[in-house]
Image (tube, grey):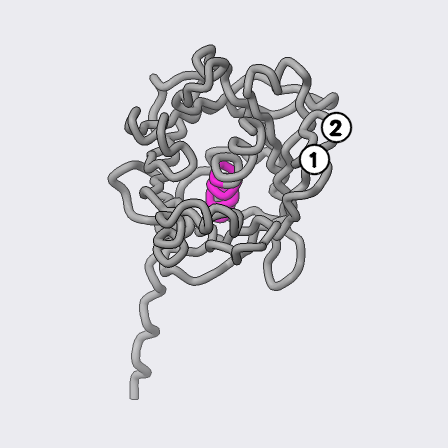
Amino acid sequence: MVPPPPPPPPPPRPGALAADIFQGQQVIMAKQIFEWVECFGIEAKNKYLISVPSPDGQPGQAFMYAHENSDCCERVNCKACRSLTMNVHSGANSLGPILLSMHKTFHCPMPPWPAAILLCPFSLCCLFAASGPEFTVRDTPDGPVIGSVFDPPGPLFCCKADSIIRDEMGSEIMRVGPVHLCQVGMCCPCCADQAVPVTRDGQQVATITRNALTCAELCGKINRFTIDFGSITDVVEKKLIFAAAMLFDLQYWEQNKDD
């Protein structure tokens, strides 16, 4: 009797056969581009140059460029809540092909202090409608979903930041944080770095670090952060960690430097 043929192998996960957009680098740096309008309190579209940092921690030659697309009204009036698409291009400008696309829908944040509820009845409605920001990650804007990053809304008195990295099926594969928002690196960005661990099953596998800012960067509202992929070699997981770093910057470090 002839044995039955073995079952066909499962199809590869979306993006698994793609080349590493980070060119095999262990550590990369994203530095925000200065926009003069932000000095007047107007939120501009975020743009970043991605490079391999030099040994002294300074940005190197950019090999990728990230650019935000968002509605002006939302960006100016609801900057922390706004919907946006962040596309990452090959090269140092938006002329190169898109290598990664992250989309965030509009969300309603948790009111930060009980006083807001007492002073504004609308805040009480937000308490029940609160939802966390989420990045849906694709290789191209119209391509299949390769994963997502979700920042769950925290309790009213919570003073920590964390997020969940999910695969294309919505299953949790890694966590970012938690870190306390009262750390020196958050309260005083010029005084110290702020390191955010990325863990799998409780073990740290990568690190996202907002580097201590110079006075010029702080005044110019420019963030600079590094991503150490650690033990992660899967090209899709590296993209999701990068997306988690971008979301963390938008939701925490961006708001922190504007305070």
Observer able to see residue 212: yes
The quadrant in which the N terminus is found is: bottom left
On the image, the x and y values in percent for residue 49 come to 50, 21
Query: Nearest the camera: 50 or 181?
Result: 181
Q: Which residue is mark 2?
A: 191
On the image, the x and y values in percent for residue 91 come to 44, 19
User: Alpha-carbon distance for marks 2 and 1?
Assistant: 6 Å
Q: Amino acid at mark 1?
A: Gly
The quadrant in which the C terminus is found is: top right
Q: Amino acid at mark 2?
A: Cys
Q: Earlier in the sequence, mark 2 or mark 1?
A: 1
Q: Is residue 8 above or below residue 204?
A: below
Give me the residue at 57% from left, 33% from top: 256
Marks 2/1 in contact by CB < 8 Å: the verdict is: yes
Give me the residue at 57% from left, 25% from top: 223
On the image, the x and y values in percent for residue 89 come to 39, 25
On the image, the x and y values in percent for residue 208 come to 61, 40
